[in-house]
Image (cartoon, helix red, strand yellow):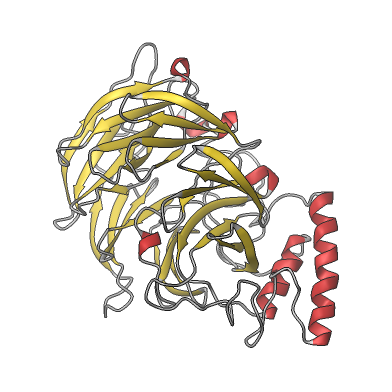
């Protein structure tokens, strides 16, 4: 691993003048497609009609998804299964129908997210007033899913943040990397009088960090399915930290020792399995990165049982992962080799790779946990992975530079104005927005730490 201070994955914009937001350029493909869409939207605006491809709607129009409008969620979890993809290139969100695997609309949000909460949240987004939790600017933000409006926010003082909701929906646990080196617990219940408020925090700046780092670098957070413990990989301390969610205190801290000639392991992302027995942790060290499989059957005392490397078939730069509904298969997003590494969690072995044709950094399960949706940034696409066959079965075109994704059963309500803004953003028109996000690896978000 390179020196932390110059690692391009950790600091993608260091050493260059990054724009405030948006991608550095607009491709001819995007320009031509956007120009046609502008003409369609302008014509629709004059005639009172909406574009026939589902990319625009007004209050009384058909959204193109078979419902009366774009927000027919049912309010009881019976609404249409939906995937939300955050496009870092133009601050839009693409809405995908997870039954037909078709794009419903791409609408302007004015904010974007690289790592939205997506572990337990897809099962909770059942009502218009429920919220998406996004890492935005120097903190986290709650966006009401029905209206796509800001409901709450927290400035952590760090540019790199990750967050997850507990299985009961009561708490949001946040990891804020440098310079904050802290953990926060927020009230995540939109019906609560203290919704969005910090209910507990842990200052970790007194913990040792490697080299000149002024703290352990808590990087990502995943939560055990029993909701009692949160797991935090510490990239600058080579530790895995276990936090008691209710007491909000550190109960265990396990050192992760380098292997061979490596100077550091660099654990930075993790995913707990649905059965509560296994934890996947992605490590940034050892050249192209490694993947650790942990036993968490005793949730407070995790034990590393296997560390996979390139020699085992692991792709380059393991960044994040998702675990199949049977808890027996891990999907590791390895952007530097432009594929997904498939891991057998029973045999502790790489069993397949899925070629994405471009770099993907995260993915999300649809609400039914049968299909995995993987944004591929370079091609403005989402690859659809069928878990049963462990294969890519579809490709969906979305907005510019898709990065983060999550899911639910609420279809956001959009209007003609927001959809027209999305069209203008697609052709490179600079629009007002205050919601950049921190990206790892290939990054045109413009956000700096």
Picture coordinates of residue 301, whole percent (x, y): 15, 36
In this rendered view, identify the residue nearer to me: 410 or 310: 410
Q: Residue at x 30, y 23 (%)?
A: 306
In the image, 405 versus 181, the foreground residue is 405
Give the left or right position of residue 367, taking residue 18 as reference: left
Q: Choose between 215 and 382: the one closer to the eye.
A: 382
Residue 322 makes an appearance in the image = yes
**Total marks placed:** 0
Determine whether, in the image, residue 275 is placed left or right of residue 288: left
Residue 392: image location, x then y, percent: 58, 40
**Quarter location, residue 171:** bottom left
Which residue is at a point 16% across and 58% down the rendered structure image? 246
Q: Is residue 7 above or below residue 52?
A: above
Residue at position x 59%, y 82% in the image: 68
**Residue 215 in sight here:** no
Vertical placement of residue 123 versus 204, above or below:
below
């Amino acid at each position: 691993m390179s020196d932390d201070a110059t690692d391009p994955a950790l600091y993608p914009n260091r050493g260059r003048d990054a724009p405030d937001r948006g991608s550095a350029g607009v491709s001819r493909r995007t320009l031509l497609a956007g120009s046609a869409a502008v003409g369609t939207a302008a014509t629709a605006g004059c005639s009172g009609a909406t574009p026939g491809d589902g990319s625009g709607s007004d209050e009384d129009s058909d959204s193109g998804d078979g419902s009366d409008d774009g927000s027919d969620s049912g309010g009881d979890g019976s609404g249409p299964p939906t995937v939300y993809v955050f496009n870092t290139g133009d601050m839009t969100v693409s809405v995908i129908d997870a039954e037909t695997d078709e794009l419903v609309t791409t609408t302007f949000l004015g904010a974007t997210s690289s790592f939205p909460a997506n572990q337990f949240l897809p099962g909770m987004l059942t009502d218009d007033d429920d919220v998406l939790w996004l890492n935005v600017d120097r903190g986290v933000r709650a966006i009401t899913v029905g209206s796509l409006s800001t409901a709450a926010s927290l400035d952590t003082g760090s540019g790199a943040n990750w967050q997850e909701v507990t299985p009961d929906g009561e708490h949001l646990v946040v990891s804020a990397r440098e310079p904050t080196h802290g953990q926060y617990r927020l009230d995540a219940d939109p019906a609560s009088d203290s919704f969005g408020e910090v209910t507990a925090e842990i200052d970790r700046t007194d913990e040792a960090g490697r080299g000149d780092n002024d703290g352990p670098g808590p990087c990502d957070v995943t939560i055990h399915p029993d909701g009692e413990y949160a797991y935090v990989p510490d990239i600058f301390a080579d530790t895995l930290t276990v936090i008691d969610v209710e007491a909000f205190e550190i109960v265990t801290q396990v050192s992760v020792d380098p292997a061979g000639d490596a100077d550091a392991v660099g654990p930075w992302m993790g995913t707990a399995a649905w059965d509560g027995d296994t934890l996947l942790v992605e490590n940034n060290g050892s050249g192209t990165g490694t993947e650790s499989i942990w036993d968490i059957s005793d949730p407070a005392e995790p034990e590393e049982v296997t560390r996979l490397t390139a020699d085992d078939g692991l792709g380059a730069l393991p960044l994040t992962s998702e675990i199949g509904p049977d808890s027996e298969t891990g999907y590791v997003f390895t952007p530097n080799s432009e594929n997904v590494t498939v891991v057998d969690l029973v045999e502790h072995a790489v069993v397949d790779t899925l070629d994405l044709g471009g770099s993907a950094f995260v993915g999300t399960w649809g609400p039914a946990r049968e299909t995995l949706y993987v944004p591929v940034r370079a091609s403005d696409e989402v690859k659809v992975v069928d878990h049963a066959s462990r294969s890519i079965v579809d490709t969906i075109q979305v907005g510019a530079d898709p990065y983060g994704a999550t899911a639910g059963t609420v279809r956001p309500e959009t209007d003609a104005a927001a959809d027209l803004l999305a069209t203008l953003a697609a052709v490179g028109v600079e629009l007002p927005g205050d919601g950049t996000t921190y990206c790892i690896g290939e990054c045109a978000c413009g956000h700096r730490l």
